[in-house]
Amino acid sequence: MKDFYEILGVKRDASFEEIKRSYKKLAKKYHPDLNPDNKDAEKSFKEINVAYEILSDEQKRKTYDLYGEDGVNGNYQDSGFGGFGDIFGDIFDMFGGGFRDSDSTRNSKSPTKGQDIRYDINLDFREAVFGVEKDINIRRQEDCSVCHGTGAEPGTDKHTCDKCHGSGQVKVQSNSAFGRFVRVVTCDKCNGTGEILDDPCHKCHGSGKEVNNKKINVKIPAGVDDNTIISMKGEGHSGENGGPNGDLYIYLSVKEDSVFKRTGNDLHLEIPISYVDAVLGGEIKVPTLTSLVDFEIPKGTQGGTTFKLKNEGVSFVKKEGKGDLYFTVDIIVPKKVNEEQRELLESLRDKSENGKEEKKGFFDKFKEFFE
């Protein structure tokens, strides 16, 4: 999804009134009743409602500004299209509906999944290729160890909020050029919980949550690549009202190797060979991930020729087998030769009739081109 501010067409320092005006304008433009059977309009309508739900709530907006969309995922990701009932009600009022059923108000006590956590790990090339275990430390929100998430001091009670009557939300009405506008906001007396604590927990001060450090062992399988994401279900922040924990997402970054270049599960490298081996052929040593392998170079090998060693690449993560290893030969031409070597090369050049014919044929092609 795009940036929420971009979706609503406002600046990041926009006031609530500016956000509301833009939202009303866009909501009317893309409302499904005015755009029947228009999938693009329906998608835009959903996006602006998600953006408005976050940016119209002061606390959610602060979280979004600090952590981006990941930081507020837990606030709406499980609600789906129906989770914006209160916002849709505002649109109905704008079109003259003027009705709101109290049953349509979102239930503040419904189970909500906790927010996800992202953790980045840097791997060496060989750690990614062969797999590795890493111990990481994360800070996550958990249910309070004293009140076990109730927010109340053990042995004390809590009662229904007399302002929102347990819904956790209150309606604010105002008139506009479009008609009566009803906005549903978080109850400021109970902070959206729908309940008032007689005696808040001394440890969490009524929030029902505490932040703890947790050590987690991450098993990274062989064959992972740069930008691989590993998910660990239930290792994120704790949920609300009995909802499940969020998930932990491990983002992997892999360093490049000085010898091997990786493309998917295949490996590539360059190997220098002497011009004697290139001409006469011979056995060379080829480095793989685990050992040096003997390989017979055919005679007359040209510089830049690529050979393949099957199944000598990187292991596949989700299936059996490995990729292949491709090596390209680079013929070494000595910069200096001794007198004996020079004489041998001169003699070879004089006797190399095949080379002269190939050279002659090359220049004959250019001669024909210019004629």
Image (spheres, grey):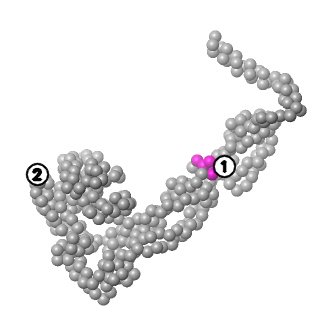
Residue 136, horizontal then vertical, whole percent: 52, 68
Instruction: Examine the rendering and report whether any part of residue 229 can be seen.
Output: yes
| Quadrant in the picture for the C terminus | top right
Tag 2 residue: 177
Find the magenta span and give its range.
Answer: 257-263
- Measuring from the top left, give residue 199's x and y in whole percent: 27, 84
Q: Which residue lies under the disc numbered 1?
A: 259
Crowdedness of circle 1 by 10 Å Cα count: few (<14), some, many (20+)?
Answer: few
Q: Foreground: 353 or 171?
A: 171
At 10% across and 51% down in the image, what residue appears? 177
Using residue 93 as the reference point, say whether residue 156 is left or right of it: right
Answer with the quarter of the image where residue 276 lies. Answer: top right
Residue 248's disc number:
none
| Residue that appears at 33% across and 83% down | 202
Q: In this view, does 193 lie to the left or right of 339?
A: left
User: Which quadrant of the view contains residue 212?
Assistant: bottom left
Q: Residue at x 33, y 69 (%)?
A: 112
Q: How crowded is mark 2: few (under 14 residues within 10 Å), some or many (20 or more)?
A: few
Farthest residue, direction top: 371
Question: Magenta segment: does it hold 281?
Answer: no
Residue 78 visible in the picture: no
Magenta segment: does it hold 258? yes
Q: Nearer the viewer, residue 53 or 341?
A: 341
Which x, y percent locates residue 97?
12, 57
* Lower position in the chain sequence, tag 1 or tag 2: 2
Q: Where is residue 311 in the image (x, y as percent from the top left)?
A: 66, 51
Q: What residue type is labelled 2?
A: Ala
Q: What element carries label 2?
A: loop
Residue occupying image coordinates x 24% and y 77%: 195
Q: What residue type is labelled 1?
A: Val
